[in-house]
Image (cartoon, grey):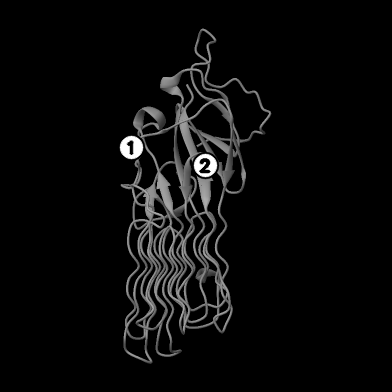
Amino acid sequence: MPILGSFGAGSGKGFGLTSAGAPDFICATGGTVSESGDFRIHTFTGPGSFVVNTAKEPSNANVDYLVVAGGGGGAYISGGGGAGGFRESHSVPVSGCYTASPLANPTGLPVSETSYPITVGGGGAGAPPPGGPGSKGADSVFSSITSTGGGLGGVYPGGPGGPGGSGAGSPPTPSPGAGSGNTPPVSPPQGNNGGGASNNFPNIGAGGGGGAAGSGSGGVPSIGGAGGTGAGTQINPAVGTPGPSGPLKYFSGGGGGGQYTASPSDGGLGGDGGGGKGSPGAPTPERNGADNTGGGAGGGAPGATGGSGIVIIRYKFK
């Protein structure tokens, strides 16, 4: 896929003109721009503006989008962080034939000749021991579409898994429980619930964080629950994390749950889509959610952070 680079808000490139010179298709700037056949893709990994310079023909003035929020943070002896909310649209006339997630809204988003601020949510901060303050992921926003940040992993001895785009896993106690996903509710849903904890003290596994396409798994004795799987799409094949098979790129995987005892034990695996692995010990890089995927942080690793989000916009330009 050829990369065209980044165009500033003042760029007046005359893309999308008919053979007669009439501005028939969208002409826009902003983000990192690439092309796939007759379709243009704008990718934002940080804040910016999607500036529509031309959108004269209503039948062509629609875009498809992927808006992923930041994943929730983890904590010492905690459940996995919830994945950032995942919201996608895919309409073949708008953005072409490619495989989108089953969660995609079939209707594109109309745009007009104006500047749309883009917010890309950061990953939630991890909570240091012994259960200090951490945070959920931050929201990502494009036009009327807001994806909600993932919930903060539930912290032992009393903090529940936080709600969010996807809910966080329960701490390694049977209560106070896991966080709710798709909070606030949207349709199609932007995420799933976190997993619960086992009830076999002291060998208690914390719950995994929820992912875009699946709930977090419950912890079992000595092993934290796996993070919920993320969702795969080809809206921009150049970004995202590889999935279990095929060309899809995945986003919004839940973080794996941590574990209460040190040995023998293990944390839960992170969900496809950048979820961090849970841990009973010190943080390592794989415990963090992956950048620009919205993956939740692995639980049990003090200070593990959620992955930042991403915004992708795709439309027909010729």
Rounded to the nearest angstrom, the CA distance separating label 1 from label 2 is 17 Å
Image-based side of 123 in relation to 279, left or right: right
Residue 87 percent across, percent down from the top left:
41, 47
Residue 257 percent across, percent down from the top left:
41, 75
**Of callouts 1 and 2, which one flags the residue occurring earlier in the amino acid sequence?**
1
Q: Residues within 10 Å of mark 1 (few under 14, many from 20)?
A: some
Say which residue appears at 41% left-offset and 58% top-offset.
Answer: 183
Q: Which mark is residue 142?
A: 2
> Where on the picture, by quarter, is residue 237?
top left
Q: As shown in the figure, which amino acid type bears the numbered disc 2?
A: Phe
- Dot 1 falls on a residue whose secondary structure is loop
263 and 195: which one is in front?
Answer: 195
Say which residue appears at 42% left-offset and 79% top-offset.
Answer: 171
Q: As shown in the figure, which amino acid type bears the numbered disc 1?
A: Pro
Residue 292 percent across, percent down from the top left:
53, 54
Residue 174 percent across, percent down from the top left:
34, 82
52 and 275: which one is in front?
Answer: 52
27 and 97: which one is in front?
Answer: 27
Q: Count how many numbered circles sit on residues in the image.
A: 2
Q: Is residue 129 above or below residue 256?
A: below
Mark 1 sits on what residue? 106
- Dot 2 falls on a residue whose secondary structure is strand
> Where on the picture, by quarter, is residue 234?
top left
Q: Is residue 244 above or below residue 186?
A: below
Q: Which mark is residue 149?
A: none
Q: Residues within 10 Å of mark 2 (few under 14, many from 20)?
A: many
Tell me whether the residue at label 1 lies in contact with that at label 2, contact meaning CB atoms closer than 8 angstroms.
no
269 and 195: which one is in front?
Answer: 195
Q: Is residue 227 above or below residue 92?
A: below
